[in-house]
Image: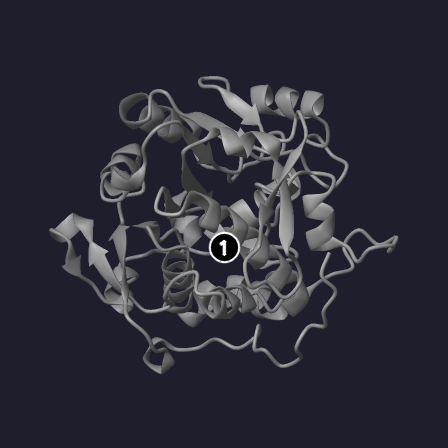
Amino acid sequence: MTQAKAVPGTGGELYIPFEKRAGEPSVVYFTKDLSVEGLRRIFARVKGGLSGKVGVKLHTGEPHGPNILPRSWVRSLLETELPDAAVVETNTYYEGERFTTKQHRETLAVNGWDFCPVDIMDEDGVAALPVKNGKWFTEMEMGKNLLNYDSLFVLTHFKGHTQGGFGGSCKNIGIGCADGRIGKAKIHTTPGSDDQWDIAKEEFMERMTESAKAVVDHFGGQITFVNVLRNMSVSCDCEGVNAQPVVTPNIGILASDDILAIDQASVDLVYALKEEDRRDLVERIESRHGLRQLTYMKELAMGSDRYRLLDIDNGDAEISLADAVKDVVPFAETK
């Protein structure tokens, strides 16, 4: 493991407005249609790069988690668009209901993920993927079975996260593809430490992002991303029934071939909400210095933080952030 020192003041708590960013824009698709049909339509915009054996990386959640992606949506999408795909996951670093493969499979059944194959990728060991130009790592241990897939569809429930500030596509693969014993330990814990969660803020974001880079580089052009901005608690789905209540309005669904652009657009849409609607989630993001995920992805040349937001509900017309969130209603009103 590469030893390094985090650079203080790298701005993980500082939001950078769109007009202060530089570089060529990527394309991010958007729909307000939070339904299986909306998911299917937006996936159609980015599915072209997927071929061969496809893994679908999503967070299947702790038992009875209230905010995870609707299984009916995922089932319909896979049956119609990816009938031969498998959902892919890895075991957790923390001791819980997904700590061992046996526990994990029991939880999958409880949560209704029994309609398609689910590959616990680290069930039979690990494979090390190279990390190019990393500060912390030269390689990252992933679930061994990741190597069995030609393409990866990263389907993410965007929400807050206790350690990362927010969980988007970067967290979904950076933590979610790393195996439960070696890779996740390298991201979360200083070697020799007894504190499982001693790495935080900028250093944690950088380690997680380097892990995500290893996955993105491995799949090259055969990886694509969808973020669902729905039921956005400040808590991750790994907290299950203990997640904090949702207070952030539902916004919509995003899709892109650019991991930085889609996570940046997701964050931007949250910041575009009214102050009273965004307050809790923004506080979670900034207090954990979660915005360092975005700036470090840019430093690692993983994508662009500038993008054109195209509204698929209106013929792929470009839409502003303000217009994208103009009609959202407080979460309590959506119940």
**Frontmost residue, 195 versus 125:** 125
Query: What residue do we see at 30% from left, 61% from top?
Result: 325
Numbered disc 1: secondary structure? loop
Query: What residue do we see at 20% from left, 54% from top?
Result: 311
Which quadrant of the structure image shows residue 99?
top right
Residue 277 coordinates in the image, percent (x, y): 44, 63
Residue 166 coordinates in the image, percent (x, y): 54, 57
Query: What residue do we see at 49% from left, 37% from top?
Result: 58
Here the colouring is: one colour
- The residue lying furthest to the left in this view is 315
Q: Is residue 47 above or below residue 269?
A: above
* Direction from residue 80 to residue 119 in the image, left or right: right
Q: Residues within 10 Å of mark 1 (few under 14, many from 20)?
A: some
Residue 177 shows in the view: yes
* Direction from residue 144 to residue 79 in the image, left or right: left
Provide the residue designation for mark 1. Answer: 247
Q: Quadrant of the N terminus?
A: bottom right
For badge 1, the amino acid type reads Val
Residue 264 coordinates in the image, percent (x, y): 41, 63
* Direction from residue 321 to residue 140 in the image, left or right: right
Q: Quadrant of the C terminus?
A: top left
Query: What residue do we see at 57% from left, 41% from top?
Result: 177
Q: How many marks?
A: 1
